[in-house]
Image: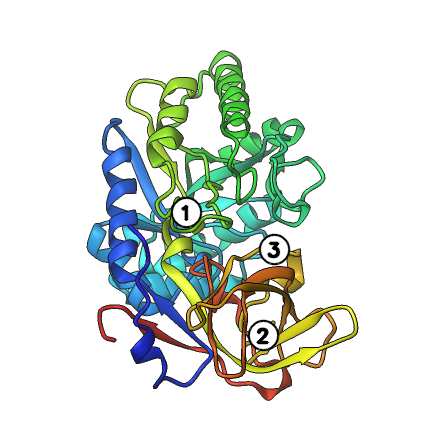
Amino acid sequence: MRTNFPITAFNDIETPFYYYDMDLLRETLATALREAAKYEGFHIHYAVKANFNPVILAAVREQGMGADCVSGGEVKAAIEAGIPADKVVFAGVGKTDKEIIFSIEKGIFCFNVESVPEIEAIERLCAERGKVAKIAIRINPNVGAHTHANITTGLAENKFGINYEQLDEVLDFIGGCPHIELIGLHFHIGSQILVMDDFIALCGRVNELQKLLQESRGLVLPHINVGGGLGIRYDAPDEYDVPDFALYFATYAKHLHLQKGQQLHFELGRSLVGQCGSLITRVTYVKKGTCKQFAIVDAGMNDLVRPAMYGAYHKIENLTSQKPCEEYDVVGPICESSDVFCKDMELPETERGDIFAIRSAGAYGEAMAFGYNCRELPKARYSDTI
């Protein structure tokens, strides 16, 4: 389905703002759940960091998904949105005592732990409260991913997870922690992955590790969590509005050798919400230089930081003009040279007041907005209410 923008309504709304196509969101969530349900024991936890807008979280709750959180604030947001605590997993290398206590008291499903000091902290805080916490060890599989270096998380030199070589030491330590129940293994190799070979490589590593643990310790854990990482097509948001969840889940079903009764957990974020959101912005000026021209818009890197941070590409559409195309650098008003959304983009001839849609901004757009230059955070609008 192609996102339909209510252009007439946009003319009367102050820009910039995020626009969410709620029909597309619901279709995407339902498709992911339908494809996962084809395989016994597959569970989806929505990665809250992608977008914690309460309306988005409400849609996730309505579909019955769990939540993957990386801060105490995300745990709180998920639970306040009505997502059951026993479907919440909490990852992250730097969980504070306050965050751990809150999660223990709420009774979350599982902590994905990333170091021995973290395990020590959870054991101590549970002991003080007479509680037992379930944990999964996040293993660093040393599997690379075909993605940007800043969003690769599964290599040995990344800050995340526990390396293979440390696993025996960690398991021995957990054996002496009466307030901790080890229920699983957790993995995550990165984000915005479109090559299934990366996930096949992860399956191979998980299979090796499971075999090793069973042979050396007789250990078969009930839960395996393979993280998320499935990407979206930023270059073609209408042609590929819903990711290929069928291929994604089938890849794991074919290549991951689960033991009888084992449950498989996924932490999808970008692939669930990325295509439903667009940043709507208005052209403030068209500035002609010697060799190029600039479309200066009222959205800035504070509203959508991915292009400045990663050099990320977002398709941009002029929703107003139907004129022949010209070449523009689309830039924002922030007092930074990196406040650029794209360079040398072909767009219909543009003039002051035209409305642009910066597409595929439903993930890591509104969630990463900040108030640099004392700018207000962008508001959100929804297809259901415009």
Q: Is residue 89 left or right of residue 326?
A: left
> Disc 2 to disc 1, how far (Cα)?
23 Å
Q: What kind of residue is marked 2?
A: Asn
Q: What kind of residue is marked 3?
A: Ala
User: Whole-percent x and y of residue 283?
Assistant: 53, 79
Residue 132 in view: no
What kind of element bears circle 1? helix
* Mark number, residue 312: 3
Query: What's the residue at 48%, 68% (across, down)?
Result: 323
Q: Nearer the viewer, mark 1 or mark 3?
A: 3
Q: Residue furthest right?
A: 290
Query: Which residue carries the number 1 mark?
Result: 271
Q: How many residues crowd around disc 2 within 10 Å: few (fewer than 14), some, or many (20 or more)?
A: many
Q: Do the CB atoms of the residues marked 3 and 2 lie less than 8 Å apart?
A: no
Q: How many residues crowd around disc 1 within 10 Å: few (fewer than 14), some, or many (20 or more)?
A: many
Query: Which residue carries the number 2 mark?
Result: 302
Label 1 or label 3, whichever comes before in sequence order? 1
